[in-house]
Image (tube, rainbow, N blue to C red):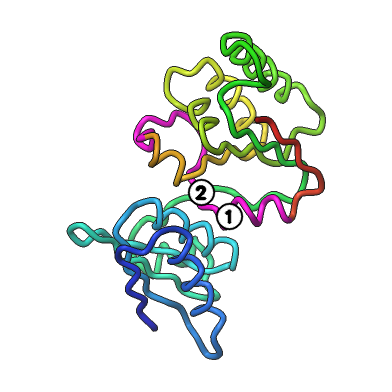
Amino acid sequence: MKTLDMIGQPCPIPVVNAKKALAENNAKGVVVLVDNIVAVQNLEKMAKGTGSAFFYEEEGARYKVIITKGVDFRHAEVLQGTAISEALGNQAGGQVVLISSDCMGKGEEELGKILIKGFIFSLTQLNPLPEAVIFLNSGVFLAKEGSNTVPDLKTLEEKGSNVYVCGTCANYYELKDSLAVGSIVDMMFITNCLAKASETITIS
């Protein structure tokens, strides 16, 4: 299989190049070398989306990701002899809610935080539920441990909605290790969700 050295490459470059390698004629799979767990998680989601098997191993300060075409996750677990991480969710195709701030509207910050809390609770009462809720910029604070919006976001996940958090934003605010809910995704994944959405609601 072809090996791609993506050490030091920012998201979404590893995913873009891995997807191109998988699309090549006669390609059975691809090996991708990366240096951060967010890239590993995003490659996993890409593999799931293409119906490929996913496996990775940590090698010091880097990760070796192996994506194999035409093998499902259960089969791959037997072949590789190791546990395959559970897929983090499908790309959205229904209604998508994009939240790019930890407040709602302009004006008093305290009021904005009350409004966004009420809005997210209201999402749990919708029928049908949104396909996905995506957090960008300071909106990622709403998925942080201790946020009063976390219980409602967990309810959304339990009911079948996907909760996605921008990995670049989580890294920028140094929140990656303190997120309490949601899956970390890259900008390509977010772009695909928005492109496939039947309707997008934006809160900023």
* Residue 49 found in image quarter: bottom right
What secondary structure is found at the residue carrying circle 2?
A: strand
**Residue 27: x percent and y percent?**
50, 85
User: Which quadrant: the C terminus?
Assistant: top right
User: Which quadrant: the N terminus?
Assistant: bottom left
**Residue at the spot 77% in from the left edge and 46% down from the top edge:** 94
**Residue at the spot 52% in from the left edge and 64% down from the top edge:** 47
**Residue 132: x percent and y percent?**
67, 40
User: In the displayed structure, would residue 53 be above or below residue 131?
Assistant: below
User: In the displayed structure, would residue 140 be above or below residue 185?
Assistant: above
Q: What span is in magenta?
A: 174-195
What secondary structure is found at the residue carrying circle 1?
A: helix
Q: As drawn, is 176 to the left or to the right of 154?
A: left
Disc 1 residue type? Answer: Phe
User: In the displayed structure, would residue 116 be above or below residue 82?
Assistant: above
Q: Check disc 2: other Cα within 10 Å, few if <14, some if 14-19, many if 20+.
A: many
Label 2: which residue? 185
Q: As drawn, is 130 to the left or to the right of 83?
A: right
**Residue at the spot 48% in from the left edge and 27% down from the top edge:** 141
Q: Nearer the viewer, residue 54 or 131?
A: 131
Distance from the alpha carbon under mark 1 to that under mark 2: 6 Å
Q: Is residue 179 highlighted in magenta?
A: yes
Q: Which mark is residue 189?
A: 1
Q: How many marks?
A: 2
**Residue at the spot 75% in from the left edge and 33% down from the top edge:** 129
Give the residue furthest to the bottom: 26
* Residue 136 found in image quarter: top right
**Residue 169: x percent and y percent?**
46, 41
Q: Is residue 164 highlighted in magenta?
A: no
